[in-house]
Image (tube, rainbow, N blue to C red):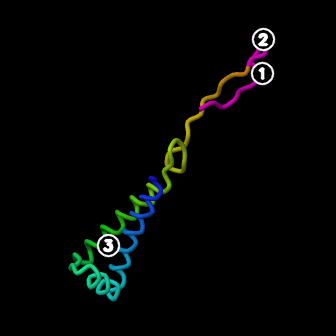
Amino acid sequence: MKKFIGYIIAIIGLISLVTWTFPQARTIIETAIKFKLPSNDILLVAGIIITLVGVSLVLKRGRGGILNPPKFTEVPIYEGNRIVGYRRHR
């Protein structure tokens, strides 16, 4: 669910960046929503921030992932009293 919300937020941020880049897109969006958009500088900053938040939600997964790597501990493997190896344990 977080990934889906992240994609939606990233798309909204990209739309904001498109309206900053292309004045024609800005007029089309303003006509469609019947609301005057804020100045170009505010759209640029908001678009960048919203896009970064969306992308970070997409890349972040439950326990592991790119932004939150899983934490493993090594557990010894015993044969009698001897340690013969180690295995990873979450």
Q: Residue at the bottom extreme?
A: 24
Taking 33 as reference, is 81 left or right? right
Residue 32 part of the magenta-drawn span: no
Residue 47 position in % (x across, y down): 34, 69
Mark 2: which secondary structure? loop
Q: Amino acid at mark 2?
A: Gly
Identify which residue, 45 or 14, lies in the foreground.
Answer: 14
Identify which residue, 62 or 77, lies in the foreground.
Answer: 62
**Residue at image mark 3:** 44
Residue 66 position in % (x across, y down): 54, 50
Identify which residue, 24 or 32, lies in the foreground.
Answer: 32
What's the distance in space between the residues labelled 1 and 2, CA to CA? 10 Å
Q: Residue at x 25, y 71 (%)?
A: 42
| Label 1 or label 3, whichever comes before in sequence order | 3
What's the distance in space between the residues labelled 3 and 2, CA to CA? 65 Å
Q: Quadrant of residue 13?
A: bottom left
Residue 87 part of the magenta-drawn span: yes
Q: Residue at x 70, y 29 (%)?
A: 87
Identify which residue, 82 or 17, lies in the foreground.
Answer: 17
Mark 1: which secondary structure? strand
Q: Which residues are magenta?
A: 78-90
Mark 3: which secondary structure? helix
Q: Amino acid at mark 3?
A: Leu
**Residue at image mark 2:** 80
The residue carrying pointer 1 sits among few (fewer than 14), some (14 to 19) or many (20 or more) residues within 10 Å by Cα, namely few
**Residue at image mark 1:** 84
